[in-house]
Image (cartoon, rainbow, N blue to C red):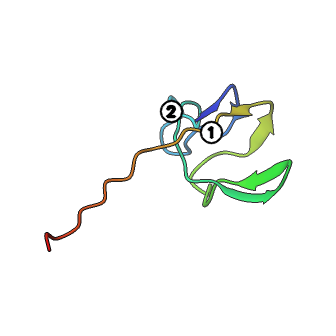
C-alpha cells in the first residue's frame, strides 16, 4: 500500500491520487522498486511510504 505521497494525482480526476492504492511492485534492489505504468498520474513531487501487504491467492485444483 502506498501512502503520504505528494503529487501523483490522477490527471482526469484531481481529487484522487496514488495514496491508499495497492499496486503490484517489482523490486529492483534493496532500496528501489517499480510500481508499473504511472502515465495516468501527475508527476511525483516528494515523500511517501510503501508497505508490503501479502494478498491471498486462491488456488483451485480439480479433484482426482
Q: Quarter of the image containing the N terminus? A: top right
Residue 62 located left or right of residue 36: left
Give the spatial CA distance, label 2 vs label 1.
22 Å
Residue that appears at 69% across and 25% down: 4
Residue identifier under label 1:
52
Q: Nearer the viewer, residue 27 or 8?
A: 27
On screen, 26 above or below 9? below
Residue hosting label 2:
16
The residue lying toward the viewer, choosing from 37 and 23, is 23
Residue 51 in the image: x percent, y percent? 65, 34
Q: Residue at x 59, y 31 (%)?
A: 19
Image position, residue 34 (x, y; %): 71, 56
Q: Quadrant of residue 38?
A: bottom right
Q: Earlier in the sequence, mark 2 or mark 1?
A: 2
The local crowd at label 2, few if under 14, some if 14 to 19, many if 20 or more residues have their Cα within 10 Å, is few
Is 27 rendered above or below residue 22? below
Tell me where residue 6 appears, x and y as whole percent.
73, 30
Q: Quadrant of residue 60?
A: bottom left
Give the number of callouts.
2
Residue furthest top as drawn: 4
Amino acid at each position: 500500500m502506498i501512502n503520504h505521497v505528494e503529487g501523483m494525482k490522477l490527471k482526469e480526476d484531481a481529487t484522487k491520487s496514488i495514496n491508499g492504492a495497492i499496486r503490484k511492485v517489482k523490486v529492483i534492489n534493496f532500496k528501489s522498486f517499480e510500481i508499473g505504468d504511472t502515465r495516468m498520474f501527475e508527476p511525483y513531487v516528494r515523500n511517501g511510504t510503501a508497505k508490503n501487504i501479502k494478498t491471498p491467492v486462491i488456488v483451485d485444483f480439480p479433484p482426482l
